[in-house]
Image (spheres, coloured by chain):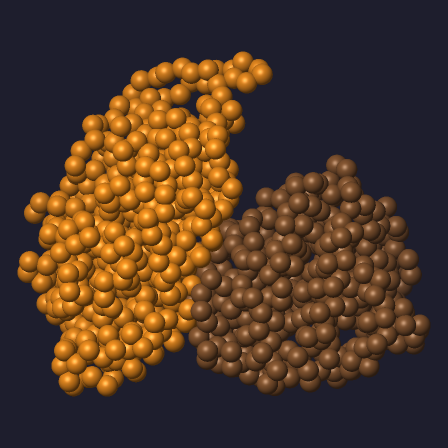
Chain colours: A brown, B orange
Amino acid sequence: MMKRPLAKLVSIVAIAMLAGNTVQPRDQHCVAADFLNYVWQEQPAMDPAGAPVDLRQALVGEVSRMLFLGHLAPMHLVKGIASQQAILPWGNRAGTTGAEWLWVNPGEVVYTLSLAYPFLSGDMKTAVKAYLDEEMRRFPPVKRGAGCWAYPSYTNCLSQGTRREAYDLPDSDFNVWPVPTPPVENLYFLWVYAKNTGDWAYIANNWSDILAVYSDYKALDRTPTYGEIGGLIGMARLAKAQNIPSLADEAASLAAQGMASGVDFDSIVKNANTLNGSLHEEGVFVFVNLTPEVGRYLGDNVQARTKAYLDNLTSIGRMPNWYQSRAESQGGGENEYSSPYVSWPIFMANAYVLRQSQFALRKYLDIPWCAGDLYYIQKLVATMEAPSPSFSVFFPSAVK
Amino acid sequence: MRGKAISLLSLVVVVLTAVSSSGSVSEATINVGTGHSRQETVASYQVALASPDDWPTVQKNPQRTGYASESVEPPYFIKWTWNTNQAAAVRISGKTQPVVSQGMVFIGAYDGRLYALDANSGAQLWSFPTGGPIFHSAAADGDGRVYFGSDDKYIYAVDITTGQCAWAYRTGAGVWVAPLVVDGVVYAGSRDGYFYALDAASGRLRWRFKTGGPILNTAAYSNGRVFFGSDDMYAYALGASDGVLQWRTKLPGQSFRDYWPVVSEKQNVVIFRTMPVYPHLDMLDAEFSAVLEPTRNQGFEAEIAAAVSYLRGNRARQSLFVLDLVSGRERYVAPVLWTGGVGGPAAPPVIDPTGDKAYLVTLSNQGYWLQAGGFYDFRSAAALALLNLSTGDIAIVQPNPPASPSNPQRAFRLIGDETSSLSLLGSSLYVSMSQGVGKIDLSTGALSHAIHEMEPPLDGFTYATNLAIFDRSESLAFSSESTSAHLAPAWAPAIVSHGAVFWKSDGGALVALVHQQR
């Protein structure tokens, strides 16, 4: 049976208090240490052959569409009044209204195709690796001052490639300011890429850029969101792989401290919403870029609150159609659409935090919004990896 | 391709859970067992014959004109309401319009059930469960069946006398449109991108047509052709009998969403509306500054010329398209500016009984609220317009000033940044908005509230969640119990049938209004 570090800690404190002893508050670093196992315990790999055939076929179909279409331009979406000129999910809101841009961050395509990679055939793996090589060459995921992270090449990042939309875009919408910076989440994305493709050389060759992203994030000196905790976990693992134990320990410690703070779920909700703009009232930002590790941490330590929050979000009075592509809007103001940005984090929280079964998640897969719907591909992978009669992920007892 | 119609027996789960709640007239017994024999006793209801006064489909007819010769005149009385209990209300999608046929009202809900009500009393007769939310209107064939789509991917046919499934056809994704029923064929698009034609009697597939995007747009029909938009942003015309492509026309905009094309057979045109690629305040600001401001004191002709010039120079800002029925070519650029509340397509027009003209809402300096002293902005500049379908010219329909200018909060007015959906009931135009229904008597110009869902705020912004009816002087004539307000915008036009106006409220409440003798 899995141990629950925080629950254990609370029990110890409670027993001590009942005994009438004076208990000294634990140093925050001691508390954080309880969470280190989430940094180092990796998601056990499943046998791809054990994944349902129909889901694998769907995955192959979506990946094949991407390979066929070549580089895909980010998706432009105007959902109504509350579309701020924005690069989701990292804010950078420049005006009161404007288009939302999805999948601008090159790290997202790297992460998504890396998640799909183990489930693909040998030939497709080769094709996907070649696709990613070209993507990462043209649009480096962590190289500040280049590609999507610099002006004016940033404008090209929005405009170049096969369009995901069926309509022509207003020229003015390509002028988004300020230019975003690589988010710390990209460090986790790169770790998944290297782990699944075996391309550790990319990590070594781009190490200074990776360090710069990490340093930039540390300089923010703030309580991390759950997505950012995943980024710190990625940094720790990349550093370990680079055989830099001091850096690995530092990043792991920051991740664990974030988790210690993150048991106050409601404060993270507030932080995440603040970071991502006030006009998005759906309240889903707290689950953006959720990784399996952080999902497991939430499930072990904050599950009741997380479930209550999700139950409220998806209730009949809020967003009962949250999972649907192009659904009529029910949150976030006077909008025609629900953005794909709503269904994705809720789905991943169901998969990673609540550990919903494959059967349950299938009900919410729905259909992709367009070719290259990265969120849909992530949902497919999470569904294949979800517990089912023929497969369940087993985590050994927590290790300190 | 072989149809995927499934039999009554294979729908055992659905059938066994069908509910009949009241008003049984006679009973019948059918066998629904599979594997284990089982019998289900179901109610059977006597139904009226189909009538020209039925409103059996979205906007009354397959051309979606939104016109009925019947009218109900004020003063009004609420004959019955349904789904007004906020605590227990079922949620209804915004564009879902109730339909009336053979003495019954049909409306689908988020809970996956199609509800059948007695049109006279509002009593619930039965409800039919599906495996997913129902997002649009049903269509009745006047011969004992009602058809509708569900997000569970099926198109259903249900016997209205028993509430039992006749057949169900599985598509590749959720069906979010209202079916079109013509000459024994049921037509509906699916989010799988296919447009389906099914045999109404058996549910067998007659043909299907693949488009390049999900189909959310309800189809219209005229003279052997079906018309609809797909989110590949083509407007399509297919042969109704064989599904052969007649034409397709690419239109600006990012979606057709869940409204419908409107046909004028007299003028041989089909009218589409699309969702702009600009945020809605951006649309309104641009229209106001580019068209209305420069022509503020130059008269209507100057305004119209500016509107046409603006739309021709900014095709992505055009949101209304009048296409030739036969060729699909655009007839003209009408000087119609976008209005709306959430950035979706502006509501489709309604066609007057001559077939020569269409009523719609646009922005204009001639808007009656602006004329009556509203703030000079796009919110006040909404105007009711009459589009000449032959020439593309528009004229402003100027209602009489609001009846109670001293109490403007209670006066009904068009609002530029709210979605206003229309129906033409007799000589009155009904305007359904997020907070109520206005009625414009086209013969007298009288403008009045028919229903206000929420009692207007006398103290500014505090709304009470009740149904309110106003008389001609805008005095409160009726106020109901609390309703479930603000669950979904009321973007479906009000309808009329057999002496009653039916309206689905903001909160999904269904209201039947009748004339009250005094």
A12 or A57, nearer to the observer: A57
Please provide percent x and percent y for residue B68.
16, 46
Q: Residue at x 67, y 50 (%)?
A: A60
B375 or A44, nearer to the observer: A44
A61 or B75, nearer to the observer: A61
Residue B511 appears left or right of B265: right
Q: Is residue B400 above or below residue B511?
A: below
Please provide percent x and percent y for residue A226.
71, 66
Can I make out residue B439 in this image? Answer: no
How many numbered marks have been drawn onto this rendered protein structure?
A: 0
- Place residue A54 in its image quadrant: top right
Please provide percent x and percent y for residue A224.
72, 72
Q: Residue at x 20, y 84 (%)?
A: B295
Residue B22 appears left or right of A222: left
Q: Is residue A197 above or below residue A107?
A: above
Q: Residue at x 29, y 74 (%)?
A: B312
B427 or A173, nearer to the observer: A173
Can I make out residue A363 in this image? Answer: yes
- Place residue A18 in its image quadrant: bottom right
- Place residue B438 in its image quadrant: bottom left
Q: Is residue B154 above or below residue A245?
A: above
Residue A393 appears left or right of B173: right
Q: Residue at x 81, y 61 (%)?
A: A197
Please provide percent x and percent y for residue A286.
64, 65
Q: Is residue B40 above or below residue B18?
A: above
